[in-house]
Amino acid sequence: MARSRKEKLQGCIRMNLLTILTVVGTLGGLTFGVILRNSKSEPWTQREIMYIAFPGNLFLNILKGLILPLIISSIVSAIGSLDLSLSGRIGAKAICYYLCTTMSAVILGIIMCVTIRPGKGYDAGEVEEINGRRNVTTVDTLLDLVRNMFPPNLVQACVAQEKKSNLIVEMDISAAKRNLTLFDWKLDDDPDNLFVTGSNTLGMVVFSVVMGITLAKMKVEGRALLAFFDSLSAAMLMMTSWVIWVSPLGVFFLIAGKIIEMKSLSQLAGQLGWYFSTVMLGLSIHGFLVLPALFTVVTRRLPFRFMFNLAEACTTAFGTGSSNATLPVSMKCLEEKNHVDTRVSKFMMPIGATINMDGTALYEAVAALFIAQVRNVQLSLGQILAVSVTATMASIGAAGIPQAGLVTMVMVLDTVGLDSKDVSIILAKKTTQATSRESIPEPLGSYPGALPTVRRGRDRVRTTVNVLGDALGAGIVDHLSKGELARMTENAEELSDVEEHLMQPVGNKDNMALT
């Protein structure tokens, strides 16, 4: 009996070895970072931090290099192998899930902010407008979003996103003839300003969806190309399985580097403690109570085993701070440990990593109300509803918006008439005069570095919640679509048997002729 227990324990360890190592790497990175940080009286230089974080950054670069090939091949393979009507039903369920969870995150954030009132008593001082040539408006943002959905050059879309820089040119007008609130907008057509660095993930997702639908409609004619994407997807997943075994070491050095780089947490608590606590509490409630409860209601089973099998993906998300970089790990956990149908995981996870941003939506709603409280602006019920809708839409479209952190926040503030320069309170940027020609950005407030610490901690928890939401959504849609997927598999097997049967007589006749 004792031997049987020992074998079970060994089997459990072998099955969850990578998860255990990743958790150990996360905790070890935290400990190692704290030890190194306290080992010197003077601050660590950026060069020293770069050396320590180098293995982690190398791991992150390898993961990011797998993202685009994995996204494109997975989406094309999944949609191309599904019946179009079934693809539509799965897509409708996925979109419904994304909208419901994102809206629930926004509502939760608003309730938390109205209840806790983190902006009460906070003194932001004089906030100067963030530097930049671009005058961001909601219309500009939406147009950039649509432009990036349809990139003019797919190769360029792998490395850049399109944007338009709008410049206000003052006009010589008289009050008697013209409305003084109107301006002429001059588009900056400088080619250097039309694109910003960063993969246009949304554009590649749209292209992949259309390509998958096209191959599904082509049927026999499209099988050769579909087989190529199937092979590419399998190859990318195999490469991912190799890279994932390095994740404990990569996460260890990534977290250690960030811990050393952080400023005093006591200063953080003194400056933005209530804001930080509100965001983190809201993210925790949404990620570990609301989403699991929804999973239980729909699937009629407890979420603990499902979530435990996602521990590796969650720790990787916390270490890297990127939903896309965690995508290979998430898909592996879903398919191998939670036995989610590969057609569902390949379809939902790349799209979810692009548009399903529950944590982002919650943060933007809290940030907007926090800024209103700081400025003693009383928002009406209608304005709060406007914040909820805008935050939901902004988080969904964030992947297709250049400089999304700034732009989507400005969209939300613009909706309720708050001054866009107050984004500085959240983004921790203020311009000060310097001896050089350019102004030097430095953290806002009396405690330099405290607000960047807020962003780092918040972003990692937010990414973890986003990844968890994507994975639970895939599990829910897989549960709701099991019958349809099983029937489709049976039909595919029957069709394959028929094709083999039709080919058999031809071979028999040839053999008879030869004899």
Image: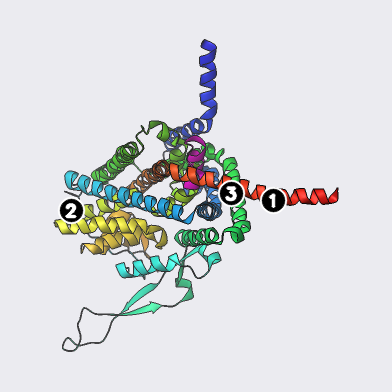
Residue position marked by numbered label 3 in the rendering:
495
Query: For the residue marked with disc 3, what is the amino acid?
Result: Leu
* Residue 51 visible: no
Q: Which mark is first along the chain, 1 or 3?
A: 3
Percent coordinates x, y for residue 251 in the rendering: 49, 40
Residue position marked by numbered label 2 in the rendering:
373
Residue depicted at 56% across the width and 37% down the height? 245
Examine the image and state in which quarter residue 432 appears: bottom left
Question: Residue 447 or 360: which is nearer the viewer?
Answer: 360
Residue depicted at 34% across the width and 62% down the height? 407
Q: Please give the range of residues in magenta.
A: 330-345
Secondary element under disc 1, as helix, strand or loop, is helix
Q: Residues within 10 Å of mark 1 (few under 14, many from 20)?
A: few
Query: For the residue marked with disc 1, what is the amino acid?
Result: Met
Query: For the residue marked with disc 2, what is the amino acid?
Result: Gln
Q: Which mark is first along the chain, 2 or 1?
A: 2
Q: Residues within 10 Å of mark 2 (few under 14, many from 20)?
A: many
Residue depicted at 61% across the width and 53% down the height? 227
Residue position marked by numbered label 1 in the rendering:
503
